[in-house]
Image (cartoon, helix red, strand yellow):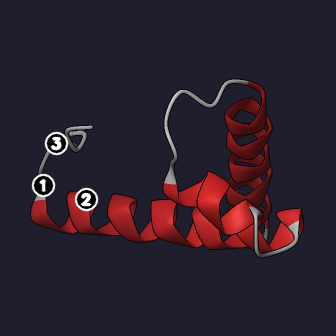
Amino acid sequence: MPPFLRPILMVLGATAVLRYARQTNPSRTWATRLLERKRPKVVAVALANKNARIAWVLMSRDENYVAPAL
């Protein structure tokens, strides 16, 4: 995969998550709270950055993701 394509795919994935979060909002997530203050594209990039950082830590430590308790 070309290196320039990865960030685009991360942002597109985050945009899909935000679209879903707006439709069904059972709890006040970090992204939905941020949407109240920032533009949707800015929040999508922030969410993609957060997901990339989590993925990097998981891969570098060879760990499995454990979702935080709600």
Mark 2 to mark 3 CA distance (whole Å): 9 Å
Between 6 and 40, the one nearer to me in the picture: 40
Mark 1 to mark 2 CA distance (whole Å): 5 Å
Q: Secondary structure at mark 1?
A: loop
Horizontally, residue 41 falls left or right of residue 63, namely right
Residue occupying the point 69% across, 51% down: 14
Badge 3 amino acid: Asn
Q: Secondary structure at mark 3?
A: loop
Q: Where in the figure is residue 51, as x and y percent of width and height?
A: 48, 60
Q: Secondary structure at mark 2?
A: helix
Horizontally, residue 25 falls left or right of residue 36, namely left
Q: Where in the figure is residue 8, as x and y percent of width and height?
A: 80, 62
- The answer to whether residue 33 of the structure is visible from this angle is yes
Badge 1 amino acid: Asp
Disc number lying in front (2 or 3): 3
Residue beneath disc 2:
59
Taking 49 as reference, is 15 above or below it? Answer: above
Q: Where in the figure is residue 28, as x and y percent of width and height?
A: 52, 46
Image quadrant for the N terminus?
bottom right
Mark 1 to mark 3 CA distance (whole Å): 7 Å
- Point out which mark residue 62 bears: 1
Q: Where in the figure is residue 30, as x and y percent of width and height?
A: 51, 59
Residues marked 1 and 3 touching at CB (< 8 Å): no
